[in-house]
Amino acid sequence: MGTSRIWPATRRMLIREACLLLLFVLLLSAMTPPAAIAEGEDSPRVLMPSPSGSKRATFKEGGVTIDYGNASQGYVMIKHRRTDRKLKVRIALGDMEYMYDLNGNNAFEVFPLQMGNGKYNVKVYANVTGNSYVSIAERNISVMLDDPYIAYLYPSQYVNYTAESRVVAQSNDLCEGLETDGEKIWAIYEFCVRQIQYDYIFAIQPKKSYLSDVDSVLDARRGICFDYAALMASMLRAQGIPAKLVIGYADQSYHAWTTVLLDGQWYRFDPTFVSASITVDVYREERHY
């Protein structure tokens, strides 16, 4: 993903945004958590991906290992033996496709199967020269998800955390004593809006293929839109609430935000622009994770 196009937008009035947020608060008070979300005694169980260990669902070729034994949980795990070559992963379903970078550290990375049920094509490429890549491994995977929203409950490359991450502890602290998902969503959203500052300096020239370190964002209390979106999605997923990190355009600005599932409907939250007192007329989604 080319995040070099993520720039601060022009400041505008916040009146309409404030009215919409007030309306959403009223809606939250009337809604109940989705029945599919299971909670533990003190806090929700944090879902964590892990290698399946299944030989029948592990494919190896060209130094690549593809573990798809947990595809029904909405993710696939991929690694390449240690190498200095640049690597990419393509995950496709029909006409839809997602491209990712892959580390060469012989360590599994988690990629979501967020396009629904069907026959996925997973392909790994290695750099030859310049911008040229060659396919080194390919596998077709039949996916039948246990739940249509399950891909948005696990961490993955773009929304990356562990059960021991500080964002999980922060999420539990924010949601302690809250009973409904609506209350938890609002507590996490308010935290991101009020406690995280926009990093205008870093936004001028972010790294290519930028991925957010959500614990570092939490510690620094600052970040760009991708960081806000990843942080909010991470804390929501830690509470068992499906959340997407969305990439697209907010008016003319290349941007990232979060959408959250509540009572069977997806709601958009943009903590970046609300914290900066910026309103948006039109959002256009390109992809989500």
Image (tube, grey):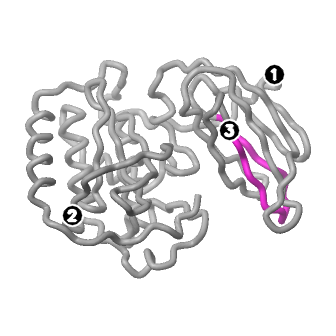
Residue 8 location, quadrant: bottom left
Give the residue type at disc 2: Arg
Magenta stretch: residue 11 in it? Answer: no
Label 3 Cα neighbours within 10 Å, binned few <14 / some 14-19 / many ≥20: many
Quick one: SS at disc 3? strand
In the shown orientation, is residue 234 left or right of residue 91?
Answer: left
Residue 31 percent location from the top left of the image: 16, 27
Residue for point 24% across, 44% down? 175
Quadrant where the N terminus sits is: bottom right
Q: Earlier in the sequence, mark 2 or mark 3?
A: 3
Residue 176 location, quadrant: top left
The residue that mark 3 highlights is 91
Residue 195 percent location from the top left of the image: 25, 65
Nearer the camera: disc 2 or disc 3: 3
In the image, is residue 287 above or below residue 199? above
Mark 3 vs mark 1, CA separation in Å: 20 Å
Give the residue type at disc 1: Arg
The residue that mark 2 highlights is 194
Q: Earlier in the sequence, mark 1 or mark 2?
A: 1
Mark 2 vs mark 3, CA separation in Å: 36 Å
Stretch of the chain drawn in magenta: 76-91
Quick one: SS at disc 2? helix
